[in-house]
Image (cartoon, coloured by chain):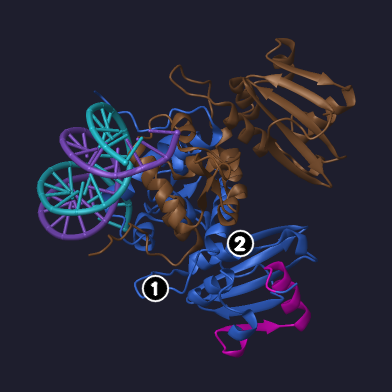
Chain colours: A brown, B blue, C purple, D cyan
Amino acid sequence: MAKQQRRNYGQYCGLASALDVIGERWTLLIIRELLTGPCRYNELQANLPGIGTNLLADRLRFLVETGLIRQRLMSPESKIKMYELTEQGEGLREAVLSVARWGLGLLQAPAAEDVVRPRWAVLAVEAMVDLGAVVQDEQYEFRIDDEVFHIAIEGGRVAVRHGKPDFDPALLVTTDAVTFVEIGAGRLNPLEATLTRRLVMEGDDDAVLRCSRLLGLVR
Amino acid sequence: MAKQQRRNYGQYCGLASALDVIGERWTLLIIRELLTGPCRYNELQANLPGIGTNLLADRLRFLVETGLIRQRLMSPESKIKMYELTEQGEGLREAVLSVARWGLGLLQAPAAEDVVRPRWAVLAVEAMVDLGAVVQDEQYEFRIDDEVFHIAIEGGRVAVRHGKPDFDPALLVTTDAVTFVEIGAGRLNPLEATLTRRLVMEGDDDAVLRCSRLLGLVR
DNA sequence: CAGTATCCTTCCAGATACTG
DNA sequence: CAGTATCTGGAAGGATACTG
């Protein structure tokens, strides 16, 4: 036998065939990391505590084979490798957000041993976006712990991206990852978070309102 | 140790917490079965070839504990037990459809050993529904292999349900599960399927058009 | 930095036998 | 019918050491 067969469900069904590819342990969490931008091997390892390097390598190899991700050099001269989603992998965004949205509702208070990362808060932000609440093109800057990202509204489309906004943001939101995830989970009232300074929104009052509506924090 | 701890990711993140509950093998397929209506133990076993009775029992027990499903007697007098989704479990519908929609795009021609079930075609139908194409209240009857179900459009909402329509349907669609899944996967042209009689749509031409649009089969 | 290689543990598949 | 209980080989997962 040249190559052993992967375990699969053997069902002619969209869900089953999806799970044959992304159903194994850790796989969807790797996709989650890449949904907020390309990552290096060690970054992935650092953001997926407990994965074990062999499994990470296995999963990455399989996902490259399957065409969900690809390897690319960071720049022509450097030999630092990055992993990034292909178009097919990017196609999982809606599905991942949908699952994450459901999972947000399960969250209790963080346990002492729970790990949190700013980029997971980014995912929470994205899962919370209500497309019906888009009013005007603008950008909001978020500073979550040590990471900066922004929401860009462009012609009715909403993108959540890493790094600073492309232009002067209408709003600057400063918070920590736990606070943001808790708000997303509906466990923490945004007003309360604001009053206790766990969440700080600086900017025009109207922009604060628009952003709050976009994230479903107020009606 | 009274009760061993389930393996979990230990991440304070919506996606990770969702996967702690529904990430294990077979779990989401059990949810899929229940999304098209309550099932008995043996039905589940029959529709999930390969699961093994102990594993199915384990999963069901866990899902009941977690509150995603519940057990109920079929009728007060009979002692036939059914499993059905709780409201929380029902909350997974969008997420499951979203994953299934992505997975449909992966499907190749069915392999000889692949299993197909009419209810998976029901899922495909539901995943294909384009809410933007809803025009008027009506119902469509589907006969896939030996199962009957229908799409009910009521005030802009679309429901896919088991059994016969509540009133005279605008359309009767007859086909087999493989054909329907293949159409959903974009592998089979609906016109071709119609011409080869693998798919038969009986009804008013306008209704055929509306239904085809609803399922994204024509623009 | 970006992985292999190794070893050990846990989970899963499949079979079978049993119970209320 | 609707499960529980037990067993076994094999596959997947986890921890750690090592390498170009």
- Of residues B106 and B217, the one nearer the viewer is B106
Q: On the picture, is A175 further left or further right than A59? A: right
Height in image: B134 above or below B75? below
Residues at discs 2 and 1 in contact (Cβ within 8 Å): no
* Residues packed near mark 2 inside 10 Å, few (<14), some (14 to 19) or many (20 plus): many
Q: Quadrant of residue B154?
A: bottom right
Which residues make up the magenta segment? Answer: B194-217
Which mark is nearer the camera, 2 or 1?
1
Host chain of mark 1: B
Q: Which mark is residue B111?
A: 1
- Of residues A162 and B71, the one nearer the viewer is A162
In the image, residue B121 lies at what x, y percent?
52, 68
Judged from the image, the secondary structure of the residue bearing numbered disc 2 is helix
Q: Is residue B208 magenta?
A: yes
Q: Is residue B204 magenta?
A: yes
From the image, which quarter does the C terminus of chain A lie in? top right
- In this figure, which residue is indicated by the disc labeled 2? B126
Q: On the picture, is B132 further left or further right than A17? A: right
Tell me how far mark 2 sits from mark 1, CA to CA. 24 Å
In the image, residue B38 lies at what x, y percent?
48, 54
Q: Earlier in the sequence, mark 2 or mark 1?
A: 1
In the image, residue B197 lies at what x, y percent?
57, 88
Q: Residue at 64%, 29% (x, y): give it.
A: A184
Height in image: A208 above or below A65? above
Q: Residue at 85%, 28% (x, y): give it.
A: A170
From the image, which quarter does the N terminus of chain A lie in? bottom left
Q: Residue at 74%, 11% (x, y): give it.
A: A195
Judged from the image, the secondary structure of the residue bearing numbered disc 1 is loop
